[in-house]
Amino acid sequence: MLEKIQAPADLRALGHDQLVELAAEIRQFIVEAVSVRGGHLGSNLGAVELTLALHRVFDSPRDILLWDTGHQAYVHKIVTGRQAGFCDLKQAGGLSGYPSRAESEHDWVENSHASTILSYAHGVATAVELAKTDRKVVAVIGDGSMTGGMAFEGLNNLGHSGKRVVIVLNDNGRSYAPTVSKLSESVSRIRVKPGYVHASNRLENLLRELPAVGDLAYSSLQGVKAALRELLEPPAFFEALGVRYVGPIDGHDIEKVESALRDASAFDGPIVVHLLTQKGRGYAPAEDDDEKNLHDAPAVFDPLLGPPLGWSAPKGYTQAFTEALCEIGEHHPQVVAITAAMPGPTGLLPFQSRFPDRFFDVGIAEQHAVTAAAGMAMAGLRPVVAVYATFFTRAFDQATYDAGLHEAPVVFCLDRAGITGNDGPSHHGVLDLALCLTIPGMTVFAPSSAQEVATMLHTALDLEGPASLRWPKGDARQVAADQIGEGLHARKVKDGTDVCLIGVGKMLAATEDAAVELERQGVSVTIWDPRVVKPLDQRMIDDAARHRLVVTVEDGIRLGGAGSHIADAVAGLHEGRQGPPVVILGTPDRFIPHGEPQAILQQLGLDGPGISAAAVKALAALEL
Ligand SMILES: Cc1ncc(C[n+]2csc(CCOP(=O)(O)OP(=O)(O)O)c2C)c(N)n1
């Protein structure tokens, strides 16, 4: 049946039994695709029925379907003519793991940072209203994404402005870990007691039948409504903001979902349709198994067995961080750890189980995480905020003015820095270095080995002000004790005379590859591992300045990044001398699509051959 579904209109011709059969086929299709290419398994399996219902009730692309985060849009892609692309899901040049405007006119938003969709919906609905068209605007948001501050801002403004938006709350009780929020807790009570749902339906019917005549009837109606609100907190929450609430509804019952969506589409204002769904639904290895369904599954697993146990355990730099933080935690009771809904991927789970009172998951709320950490630091704690480098950008203001301005000793541990790969433009961690460098007083570390993570974390926690450490996903280089630096010093890796290569963090390895090629061509090379990008070690700068050419290499944006900072120091004009030219290698001034990290780095000239070629070219230009 799936092959016959080439466009949303094909869904509208199906009867209920056929839809149920189609949902099962779609699940099998997703499991098979993800087992080969990797991807967000649980979230998509939980969104099958709601997506089918959405495409039957609304007429996309005329009506506008918007997906928060976008990791749950596989079914949407499948029914909008993109089945064939799933064989290349998340591969370079292949189907994106998120909505993509280049792929389809059914896709609008491709930023995969969470909690934005109600704001987009507000904007789109405003334009639709001004254009005086009757296009419907629908925003799908998960309970995890509802914990983000932007979602509350959007909801507040939607309620205030009365914009006509259908909000589908896809509530599976989980984010990357069980969702942390009071709203979610009250919903959980509803989940465990289905009686609540029936009671609410009965009460709603009763209310509808009450004759609304006279003051007495009106006030008793309000009384019953208040009782209903106490019974079900989510309605009270939404309705207090001016947003109508419908639900909760079984999000796997297509008929019920469809009927609720049809009613909601006729409502003239913002309305939440609250669907209870199950992450991993219909796939036994993933249902109710947090490890198997919460994360982005690995490529290559047996569809019958599901992803192997332990696949998501942190490795490389993340593992080094986990071990270092747990060890530090034993001796320093003031050290606390904060995550924004990602305890597993950032490596904090062992710290959480060892020191549950000193671990805080604040939900998908990076901004709050940072300011809360600043508050903790002001009051004597030593907070470590562990987030992905790409999500740190959201809290840049807080890191600058709440932590930075107050010289609060918060340590930011930025995982998945650099080119991360198959999650695409909004997941590459290429801005953090440039951003951190602009925060006055921030010390910026970039470890080049697993062993440096522990050393730097100790140093960072001894500082008086904020600090950041950033490391990439995956394997870390393991080094002997004599290759670990100390304090805020840079480390000289190799001494030469012609060209000085400075490799930031993981890129140190690529500069070493480049040095082999350059020396083969008769160029004598010095290599420095800066370790600390701010403040720079003057010894390294003075040494670099004696070469004919300096080449800096980083896996972050080259405009305003580590290289610019080093070049400024090497130029030395403020000290009254003129340093050698500096070639700055980093990521370009454009968004980088998804692909395999090493292949992307190679394309960008950020590997051994690319670096040596850039150095040779610059040397040739100097000789002219
Ligand atoms: C700002 C931001 N922080 C963290 C993430 C990482 N992340 C991706 S999906 C996800 C969980 C989302 O949960 P929910 O909205 O409930 O959707 P579900 O996967 O449960 O369907 C998280 C934390 C993100 N995308 N954006």
Image (tube, rainbow, N blue to C red):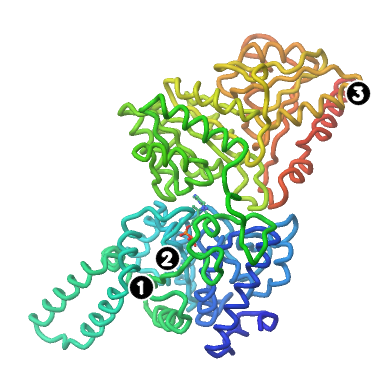
Determine the CA span between mark 3 and mark 1: 69 Å
Residue 366, horizontal then vertical, whole percent: 44, 44
Q: Residue furthest left?
A: 216
- Cβ at disc 2 under 8 Å from ligand 1: yes
Q: Position of residue 417 (x, y in %)?
A: 60, 39
Q: CA distance from mark 3 to mark 2?
A: 60 Å
Q: Amino acid at mark 3?
A: Arg
Q: Which residue is denoted by mark 3 in the rendering?
A: 520
Instruction: Name the residue carrying label 1.
Output: 248
Residue at the (49%, 24%) spot, across then down: 460
Q: Amino acid at mark 1?
A: Pro
**Callout 1 touching callout 2 (CB < 8 Å):** yes
Of 429 and 460, nearer the camera is 460
Q: CA distance from mark 1 to mark 2?
A: 9 Å
Quarter location, residue 152: bottom left
Which dot marks residue 171?
A: 2
Residue 482, how many percent across, how many down?
Answer: 67, 16
**Residue 511 appears left or right of 339:** right
Q: Earlier in the sequence, mark 3 or mark 1?
A: 1
Q: Where is residue 609, by image quadrant?
A: top right
The first of marks 1 and 2 along the sequence is 2
**Circle 3 residues within 10 Å: few <14, some 14–19, many ≥20:** few
